[in-house]
């Protein structure tokens, strides 16, 4: 199966989770990491989920799912221990055009959760299209041991530096080459670091030429 890999912006978007056990908990954590606006519906909830509700990190409604709950949501995770309920959620999601993941139930998923390695804003998401979640997990662990821990901080600096370069220079071949050069440099966490100086020198000797509009 050929899946389409994308990184969604979920900040403030209404997302709903039906079920509030251990599987729901891990999906809620993923949605929280993306700053989604999360509602949870389930008669019983794990202690973590109750704590998040108490601190208003999520909205929790202690009752069973009912038809109509998905209205206005961008995506839904069906994570109950009752396959019939998860499938009813998928049916409503399909009818309303809401993206659905029925946990561990591929025919009732519009999207799958990937295995993710994170370093700050850097994310590597792994999918096997459901062929072997255990392999996705294993690859995550392998990559996790290989990627430096300070990669996220370095990326933050690189991003700031790139913004400076982009603000100072128009889009041209030399800017593109410079940005590739900077992306290969060693950790750059201080003002006098070589890549920062390189960028400033480049901007100084290559002032912006206003391009004529044809
Ligand atoms: C990546 C990860 C993310 C997450 O869950 O957030 C994830 N599963 C993880 C772990 C894991 N899941 C399972 C095992 C036991 C070993 C094994 O079966 O291999 C392990 C490993 C373990 O925990 O030991 C059981 C399992 N999973 C699915 C089925 C149903 C089926 O295959 O039909 C069954 C059998 C259930 C049963 O028999 O009852 C289905 C799905 N699981 C997916 C995602 C989607 C496809 C991902 C992909 O593209 O590969 C998909 C299709 C739908 C979905 O749920 O999104 C997370 C690793 C996170 C991490 O640690 O990094
Ligand atoms: N935990 C695992 O590692 C694992 C692995 C593979 C598959 N599963 C399966 O995934 C499912 C969920 O796992 P879990 O560990 O999170 O289960 P769980 O028993 O901890 O939680 C189930 C949740 O579903 C809710 N629920 C039940 N009926 C509902 C309804 N009508 N409307 C809304 N919510 C409802 C319950 O209140 C509870 O919050 C189970 O079927 C389990 O067999 C679990």
Image (tube, helix red, strand yellow):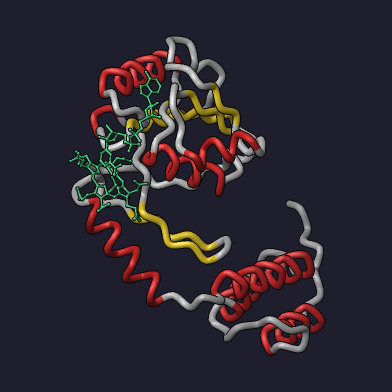
Q: Which residue is pictured at 27% across the width and 63% down the height?
A: 138
Q: Looking at the rendering, which quadrant does residue 64 occupy?
A: top left
* The one of 195 and 71 positioned closer to us in this rendering: 71
Of 107 and 5, nearer the camera is 107
Residue shown at 45%/37% (left/top)?
46
122 horizontally vs 90: left or right: right
Q: Position of residue 99 (x, y in %)?
A: 43, 28
For the residue pair 134 and 157, the one nearer the viewer reads as 134
Q: Furthest-left residue in view?
A: 131
Residue at 39% from the left image edge and 70% from the top image edge: 144
Q: Image check: 128 left or right of 78?
A: left
Q: Residue 179, percent across and down?
A: 61, 74
188 in relation to 53, above or below: below
Say left or right for 87 vs 92. Answer: left
Q: Quadrant of residue 92?
A: top left
Q: Position of residue 53 (x, y in %)?
A: 60, 34
Which residue is pictured at 67% across the width and 84% down the height? Answer: 195
- Image coordinates for residue 207, horizontal then vertical, percent: 81, 75
Q: Quadrant of the N terminus?
A: top left
Direction top: furthest residue: 67
Relative to residue 209, is residue 192 depicted above or below?
below
State the residue in front, 214 or 116.
116
The number of numbered badges drawn on the structure is: 0
């Amino acid at each position: 199966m050929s899946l389409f890999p994308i990184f969604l912006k979920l900040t403030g978007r209404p997302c709903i989770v039906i079920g509030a056990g251990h599987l729901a908990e891990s999906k809620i954590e993923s949605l929280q990491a993306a700053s989604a606006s999360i509602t949870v519906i389930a008669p019983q909830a794990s202690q973590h989920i109750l704590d998040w509700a108490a601190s208003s990190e999520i909205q929790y409604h202690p009752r069973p799912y009912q038809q109509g709950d998905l209205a206005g949501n961008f995506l839904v995770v069906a994570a109950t221990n009752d396959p019939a309920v998860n499938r009813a959620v998928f049916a409503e999601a399909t009818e309303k055009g809401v993206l659905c993941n029925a946990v561990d139930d591929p025919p009732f998923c519009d999207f799958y959760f990937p295995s993710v390695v994170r370093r700050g804003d850097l994310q590597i998401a792994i999918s096997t299209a459901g062929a072997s979640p255990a392999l996705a997990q294993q690859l995550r662990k392998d990559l996790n041991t290989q990627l430096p821990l300070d990669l996220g901080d370095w990326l933050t600096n690189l991003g700031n530096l790139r913004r400076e370069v982009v603000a100072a220079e128009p889009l041209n071949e030399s800017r593109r080459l410079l940005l590739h050069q900077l992306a290969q440099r060693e950790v750059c966490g201080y003002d006098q670091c070589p890549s920062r100086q390189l960028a400033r020198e480049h901007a100084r000797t290559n002032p912006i030429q206003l391009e004529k509009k044809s």
